[in-house]
Image (tube, rainbow, N blue to C red):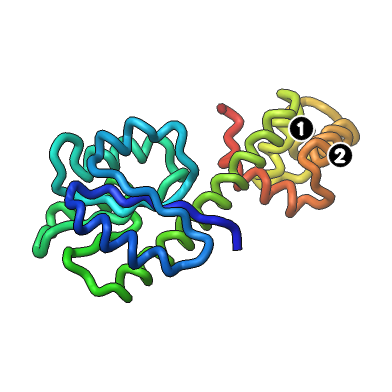
Amino acid sequence: MSTRSIYIVDDDEAVRAGMQALLSVKPNLLIFPYRSGDDFLAQLDDMQSGCVLLDYDMPGANGLDVLRELSAVSPKFGAIILTGRGATSVAVQAWKLGALDFLEKPCEPQVLLEVVENAFSKLEQDQHAAARVETAQQAIAKLTPREREVLAGLVAGSANKVIGYELDISPRTVEIHRANLMDKLGVRSLSEALRVAFAADFNLAD
């Protein structure tokens, strides 16, 4: 398993120390404690991707303030908000800002470990999905305007003859553009080409 990073952001030193001690039993986990949201945000650009255990109620930038900053670099970080009991409104706001989960303090050690593991799994899924989208968009960007028009026709389910009619080119020319675009997309079948187009959220107007 590759090394993971987790950031504990809480102004309560005892809470930070307790969570750090609990999480230290997990293998391949780097733990970074921060006493405030401001301290954490000050080093955000230099940090490795990871999960963030984020207290809501802190002096300066609170948990929701930090979440807003994290949303700008999504999906680099996955945040778990820590709140006092009964803070339902905070939890709702946290979900809207992209938090992966939230915990009421104090929480059971086993619950914390399970929530952290689930957050890492979700974060890694989101990162893989984002990488697929980026790869697909980069492939689409290699296409000429005409190849993009042919791809749009394929996405619409049109046959070569129909695409040729709409673009005022021969079906044979459509076949040539189709072969070229498939080569640039690195695919060998129409279904694979469509998968790339859908992954990139392809739109001819883009």
* Residue of label 1: 165
Quadrant housing residue 100: bottom left
Q: Is residue 18 left or right of residue 199?
A: left
Q: Is residue 155 left or right of residue 95?
A: right
Depth check: 135 or 167 in front? Answer: 135
Depth check: 2 or 164 in front? Answer: 2
Quadrant housing residue 41: top left
Q: Is residue 49 left or right of residue 178?
A: left
Q: Residue at x 46, y 33 (%)?
A: 46
Query: What kind of residue is marked 2?
Result: Ala
- Judge whether residue 93 can be spotted in this image: no
Percent position of residue 171, x then y: 86, 36
Callout 2 touching callout 1 (CB < 8 Å): no
Percent position of residue 34, x then y: 29, 44
Q: Please state the total of marks drawn on the protein image.
A: 2
Q: Residue at x 36, y 50 (%)?
A: 7
Up-down relation of residue 31 to residue 75 (above or below): below
Quick one: SS at disc 1?
helix
- Judge whether residue 51 can be spotted in this image: yes
> Where the N terminus falls, by quadrant?
bottom right
Percent position of residue 93, x then y: 20, 49
Up-down relation of residue 85 to residue 154 (above or below): below
Depth check: 87 or 169 in front? Answer: 87
**Closer to the camera: disc 2 or disc 1?**
2
